[in-house]
């Protein structure tokens, strides 16, 4: 069967020959002249039919966008039957299955927007198994991430990931997931602390990251020059942050690890002069209530969507899953299979988060990433990341008990699944509305 480009060639070749019609054409019999002119007409018809088939095949295969002279033409998203998730299915319950055919969803070396902290392969990690696990919900399938569909859902909109460096990983994951299909389209990344802004001009959209480790204001709010050991939180203040959150179409919040440095935290509530020590869970609840008040007063549920990602688990002590061993996530290459909940994931914090969100008058949806990520002791950067802005030395790598990072995640990796879950929810929203 002729391909579309073959038809184009034949049509072009014929038109060239038409332009060089022989001088003795008028002497040819009328029947021959008819055949001569009917041939290009037949080719033109073949061209039109081929073009129509090309368009229909692309629609059938969900390739809903077409690139014409570096411009994406807008076509409605086709949500196929196998992308529909039944309401009875909890996509956050399931297991990890090995898939080295369709995963990872992108390659580390093809995404220039990853920070050194998460590029584990480039930093020397010897295995890449952590990239080949696919989350399989119990009772249904997740739709495969489609970058063009995601961009179409984001057209003329802004999405912002708000939180600490864990949330920055989710932001970078989303950028990498979509950037492979926009290589020929104007896009840019801009660093305006506390934000990173990835703009895609053709879709009039931006994917943004906002550094706010406690969500409310704190002395740690500078994106690059912030204190780690000394922490002071303003539990009743969002003033600086909210100005840059307002009007964003899709907000994805996360705040956990920075709260868990110690059981108590210095904070103010009311008078900024009244600094006192709070139990972390009490402080977390007060901060969430401050955030919730802003959500109710500022979010337009007809135009905006709000998500909150639950705590990202740590794997700091491998005696929790091995027993009798004094180590951490270093050298782990396989996920866990059975039920597991590590001590690094605070159940009281989880309960507080659910209670506050359930009481809100505005719909905030939980991205319940905790349990599925608990199984992934293999996915952390370990000794193949950064410490205080620098890659670990050979000597430091030889002491994983001291230097392994069992908090942050390699990319490609686990945060890609968080974004796939977010994508699946947005796709169902698109279909339903």
Image (cartoon, rainbow, N blue to C red):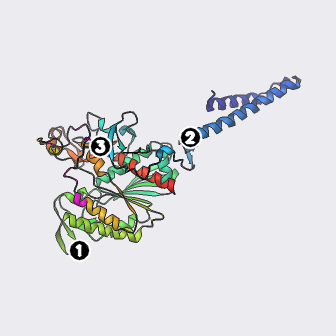
Question: Could you say which is closer to the camera, residue 422 or residue 336?
Answer: 336
245 horizontally vs 53: left or right: left
Q: Quadrant of the N terminus?
A: top right
- Between the C-alphas of marks 2 and 3, the distance is 35 Å
Q: Which mark is residue 60?
A: 2
Asked if residue 415 lies in the magenta stretch, the reply is: no
| Secondary structure of residue under mark 2 | helix
How far from the left and from the top, in percent, is residue 11? 70, 31
Q: Given contact means CB atoms under 8 Å apart, are the residues at marks 2 and 3 in contact?
A: no
Residue 27 screen position, x and y as percent: 88, 23
Classify 10 Å Cα crowding around label 3: few (below 14), some (14-19), many (20 and above).
many
Along the polypeptide, which appears first: circle 2 or circle 3?
2
Q: Is residue 265 left or right of residue 106?
A: left
- Nearer the viewer's eye, disc 3 or disc 1? 3
Task: Write the residue at 43% across / 44% down.
Answer: 145
Residue under pointer 3: 410
Q: Is residue 422 visible?
A: yes
Q: Quadrant of residue 323?
A: top left
Picture residue at 35% right of the left edge, 49% below the top: 418
- Work out how far the residue at label 1 is from the one at label 2, CA to CA, in angstroms: 60 Å
Alpha-carbon neighbours of circle 2 within 10 Å: few (<14), some, or many (≥20)?
Answer: few
- The magenta stretch is 325-349
Taking the magenta stretch, the answer to whether it contains residue 332 is yes
Instruction: Determine whether the residue tagged by mark 1 lies in a helix, strand or loop.
Output: loop
Q: Are marks 1 and 2 in contact (CB under 8 Å)?
A: no
Secondary structure mostly taken by the magenta-highlighted segment of the chain: loop
Looking at this view, name the residue that lies furthest to the bottom.
Answer: 271
Query: In front: 8, or 133?
Result: 133
What residue is shown with label 1?
272
Please name the residue shown 30% across and 35% down the image. 129
């Amino acid at each position: 069967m002729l391909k579309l480009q073959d038809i184009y060639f034949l049509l072009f070749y014929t038109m060239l020959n038409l332009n060089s019609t022989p001088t003795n054409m008028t002497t040819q019999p009328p029947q021959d002249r008819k055949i001569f002119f009917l041939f290009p007409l037949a080719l033109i018809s073949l061209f039109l039919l081929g073009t129509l088939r090309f368009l229909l095949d692309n629609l059938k295969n969900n390739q809903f966008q077409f690139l014409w002279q570096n411009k994406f033409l807008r076509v409605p998203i086709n949500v196929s039957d196998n992308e529909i998730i039944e309401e009875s299915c909890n996509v956050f319950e399931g297991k990890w299955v090995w898939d080295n055919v369709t995963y990872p969803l992108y390659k580390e070396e093809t995404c220039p927007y990853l920070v050194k902290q998460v590029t584990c392969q480039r930093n020397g990690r010897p295995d890449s198994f952590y990239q080949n696990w696919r989350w399989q919900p119990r009772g249904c399938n997740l739709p495969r991430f489609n970058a063009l569909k995601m961009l179409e859902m984001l057209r003329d909109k802004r999405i912002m990931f708000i939180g600490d460096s864990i949330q920055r990983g989710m932001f970078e994951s989303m950028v990498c997931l979509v950037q492979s299909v926009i290589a020929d389209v104007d896009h840019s990344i801009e660093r305006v602390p506390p934000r990173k802004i990835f703009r895609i001009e053709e879709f009039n959209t931006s994917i943004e990251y906002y550094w706010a480790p406690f969500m409310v204001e704190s002395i740690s709010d500078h994106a690059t020059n912030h204190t780690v050991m000394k922490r002071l939180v303003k539990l009743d203040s969002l003033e600086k942050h909210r100005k840059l959150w307002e009007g964003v179409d899709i907000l994805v919040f996360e705040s956990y690890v920075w709260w868990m440095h110690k059981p108590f935290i210095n904070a103010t509530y009311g008078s900024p002069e009244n600094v006192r020590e709070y139990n972390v869970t009490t402080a977390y609840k007060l901060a969430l209530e401050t955030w919730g008040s802003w959500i109710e007063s500022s979010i337009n549920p007809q135009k905006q969507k709000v998500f909150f990602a639950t705590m990202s688990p740590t794997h700091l002590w491998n005696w929790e899953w091995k027993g009798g061993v004094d180590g951490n996530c270093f050298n782990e290459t396989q996920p866990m299979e059975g039920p597991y909940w590590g001590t690094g994931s605070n159940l009281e914090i989880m309960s507080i988060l659910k209670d506050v969100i359930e009481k809100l008058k505005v719909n905030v949806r939980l991205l319940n990433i905790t349990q599925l990520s608990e199984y992934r002791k293999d996915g952390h950067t370990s000794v193949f990341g950064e410490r205080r802005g620098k890659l670990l030395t050979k000597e430091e790598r030889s002491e994983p008990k001291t230097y392994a990072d069992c908090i942050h995640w390699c990319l490609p990796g686990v945060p890609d699944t968080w974004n796939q879950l977010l994508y699946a929810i947005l796709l169902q929203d698109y279909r339903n509305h």
